[in-house]
Image: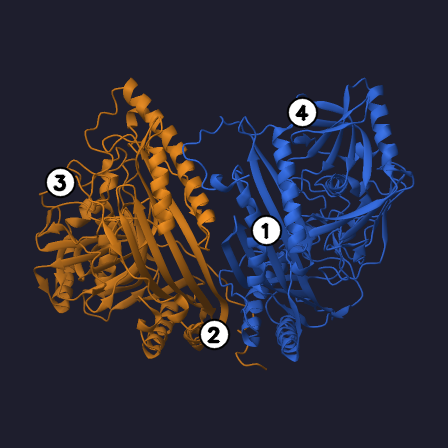
Amino acid sequence: MSIVADELNREFAGLSKADVPAYYMHYYVNDIEYATISASFGSLVHSSINRNRILSTQVRLGNYQFDNTHPGSIENGEFGGFSGGAGARVLPLDNDRDAIQTSLWQAATNEYKLALDAYKALRDRRNNTDSIKSSIPDFSKESPLEYHQASGPSLRSLYRKEDWEKKIRSYSARFLSSPHVVSGDVAFRFSTEQKYFLSSEGARIRQYVTSCYVNIAGTVRATDGDLVPLHLSYYAEVPEKLPSDDKVFADVANMVKLLDELRNAPLAEPYSGPAILLAPAAGVFFHEIFGHRIEGHRLKNEYDGQTFKSRINEPVLPKTLTVTFDPTINVVMGQPVNGAYQYDDEGVKSKKVVVVDKGVLKTFLMSRTPLDEVPHSNGHARAAIGNSPVSRQSNLIVESSKAVSMDDLRKMLLKECRKQGKRYGYLFKEVVGGFTVTDRYNPNAFNIFPTLVYRIYADGRPDELVRGVDLIGTPLAMFAEIQAAANDRDVFIGFCGAESGSVPVSASAPSLFVRRIETQKKPRQYESQLLLERPSTSDH
Amino acid sequence: MMRIITIFKYLTAVCGILASSSLFAQHDETILRAMQDELKRSMDIRETGYDKPFFISYGLTDVTSISVYASLGAIVQSEESSNRGKAMRILVGDYSFNDESLDNDSESEMSSAEIQLPSDDDYAGIRRAYWTTTDAVYRGAAKKFRKHQQTLKDQHKKIEDVPHRTYAKVPVVKVMAPDERYTIAKSDLENYCRQISAVFKDYPGMESSDVVVNVLHGRDYFINSEGSVVVRPYLLSMLQCRAELKTEHGEPITESLVFYAERPSDFPKLDLMIVQVKEMISKLQAVVKSPALDEEYSGPVLFMGSAVASAWSSTLFSYRETLVASNDIPSSTDSRPDNTSLLDTRIGKLILDNSITITARPKQKKFGGVTLLGAYDVDEEGVEPADELILVDKGVLKNQLNDRSIAREGQRANGHAGGPAVVDISSSKGVTEKALKESLIKLAIAEGLSYALIVRESGDVRGNMAEVWKVDLATGAETLLRPAQVRRLSLKDLRKVSGISSTQQAYNVPAGEGSLTSIICPSSMLLERIDVVPLRLPYEEKDVEYVTSPLAKKGK
């Protein structure tokens, strides 16, 4: 950190005296060591440990009001604005002052040149046209912070490679119990990371973070050749806090049982009608249809749909619902969540943000890219290593002030089915992810990928497992259809991909009853029945 | 039906301490037993509704890769990983008419249920990995053979009546290389790279510099249903030291030192390497200050050193004029560009200067002090090549390099599925280098030129930049120029060789997909009408130095 601090001071002293002076710069170093293991049907297929030091550099020219990142104008045919940036570069792993300083120097020089080109172009355009007249600053002023977290244990002291290889292999071996399962994969990833953020404003932040994931994926070939996948994932800060072997074995056994059931499950037809989204599915539903529309930086762009831009202090959701993003917590309902951090990727302290209070929109998720409505960051600037940060979601928590029991939620669904003349409603039990479109040049739709879907029949017959369903819709129409929430809660752990790369996020929500959803057929992936039986699992 | 799943053909290398034990023999035994058991089961496939396969081959490459990258005395990246890849070929029909006979599409459909090879010697896991792939490849081959049968039936023709491809019968080979494995001390490689790269700390004006070592070591396994078994080591190392400087106009000029070896222990010793790096830096500093070729040159050029090897390898193995026989057949269903080599129809014809003889010597391991890293005893299809195969005799094309696919009259499987391996180019009219330079000057004067050019290093080794020297026609004095581009040579340029040296040299040159070809060739060669053009490098404004380099305080 001292090498980076010295070079930052030296660089900024020089660049702030250039003909077009820099007014801000930062260095962000992610020193990450990570172990990965993967296994398939009881066989170890990969195991490695690697380490990288990645440097991200930002140099801003002009001033807080107008700088080289100023957003483009549609009038001028500019879509994304100039973000500048020469990208990330690897820093030496050895603490060799000459080598590290030289790399930092080269990064700052390159970044300055790119910023200079962008700044000159924007400045000339501003001087020659009427289009760029925004009064909103390009970069918010925030107090520089100092935080020095002690370095934590090394990756190797928190993880015994041989033990975890054995575990991961044994988890995947459980897929051999079904002759119909065509892929049974388990992947483990554990990382320890030192993060150093230093800015010319005086920020000096050193953080130590760890994360550990186990992802399990099984696929069955249905009787018609359709490949049907299921997924499981576990998250903990360190490997020893992951669920016990017994729990994982039981979960995999249940997954295999469900895969076997899915073999003969009927393919669903497109549908419109009432549905229940169980808690994990409801979390992803909110992440996609709501979360991506309150990420502040996007609301500044003229090409964005800006669904909620002018709706602060207006009702946007049912008044029983409150939506919070809280990166300051590591646990929700006793379950570890992965959207936590102490300082964001612009060196701002993370904050709990109540975005919707009793149905009324209160604010947006903010980075240091301000809006008229929200002039300061609330610690939600995030990026995958090496990317430029933008405002992103963290731990999403949806709460209802008027929760009902699951039985009542089910009764509401059945009543609504009868009212709409539907033979059945849908129960979305598990999802694997989804996506949404927020720009104004494409339909503002979302698509959620359920993996476990049941029909709930109005005539009382048993629920029926179906396959081949994707949940689709448009956000504003969907908000109006949320009728009730249950008194349960579950957490979805995942990664969210957007402009600044893939970042860890969680979504916690109660189960929801929605008056009308729409589904479409899932794209099919076909595989013929194999001509030979799976070879014996024994050595002879 | 060929289907490469994953094949690791990196520029590999191995150094370190030789280790050998019964533990490793156990590796071979388990892997081979799993491959053979699954292959046997697959050959016995019944009641599928398709014809049975008549040929199956399985390949497995087990490689450990080490990659170390250092800059300015510090390690930037250092990684070690093990990977296993499998290759597979399944043929349905018979040797004379099979699923590969009637079109040029050799790819199989991928299986969605692909299972990866285990990274350890897991007998059942290895069988499972071959099982799913075999199923997909076999199914594709069987369907295609059925389609070919129908095509002939529809056309009322026999296979002999149409252009077609056969599969050559070859002797069964059994090669089991001693099961020797290597333990590589990655920390030794790191120290080596660290110390070499630290030399650049004394040169703050460098735009960038780095030292990279890549090492691959492991074993290759090959079996087929005919009974061939080939197990052999996989060893290759590469060291590259690279530096970049800019001219006063901001043009980047790069200089590299590249070494190939089986083992990193065969790289130059540290003190010698440091001397060579300093010489490279001096040369680079001279190059950026040297004059540029200021016009397009067309006239005699004397190729020397690695430039000769590059000239031959790029000419003899280019896309359209390669000595490697084409497997393509005329096909009305193939919409892709014709991949046929122009040489396929020129057997028995003069294609080069009549002093030139080219011989494939795939098993030759050394030439002088150079290890020929392209050499092999058995090719990738388990075929043993002859010690020598004359390809060109006094300028006349006699043979092409071929694998087991026979697409036209006169072709035969000659053990070159692995490529050229080692190629020996010799001349019956060799002279001294002094004589060649005199001839160069005479030719240039006769052409009415004011100077002549010598190319000493090839573009291939140096990115796209050839090392070019300007020769004063009156005094013979040589002046180093900035890098220039030699127009790509073709066989036509080699129909008349104006002079060639009597001494030979050997180089290992990249041959694509990470493999190397070893070229034994004359050390100089004079060609009469060669175009050399100034290299159009990106032009940038002179850098403004806003902040001085941190190394400036200690630089030379």
Q: Amino acid at mark 1?
A: Ile
Q: Is residue A540 above or below residue B13?
A: below
Q: CA distance from mark 4 to mark 2?
A: 63 Å
Q: Which mark is residue B196?
A: 1
Q: Cα distance, mark 4 to mark 1?
A: 32 Å
Q: Quadrant of residue A491?
A: bottom left
Residue type at the position of mark 2: Gly
Q: Which dot marks residue A42?
A: 2
Q: Is residue B318 left or right of residue B278?
A: right
Chain letter for mark 3, please. Answer: A
Q: Give the distance between the C-alpha atoms of the residues marked 2 and 3, in whole angstroms.
A: 53 Å
In the picture of the structure, the residue carrying the numbered disc 3 is A311
In the rendered image, residue B493, in percent from the top left (x then y), is placed at: 79, 32
Q: Colour of chain B?
A: blue
Which residue is denoted by mark 4 in the rendering?
B293
Which quadrant holds residue B123? Answer: bottom right
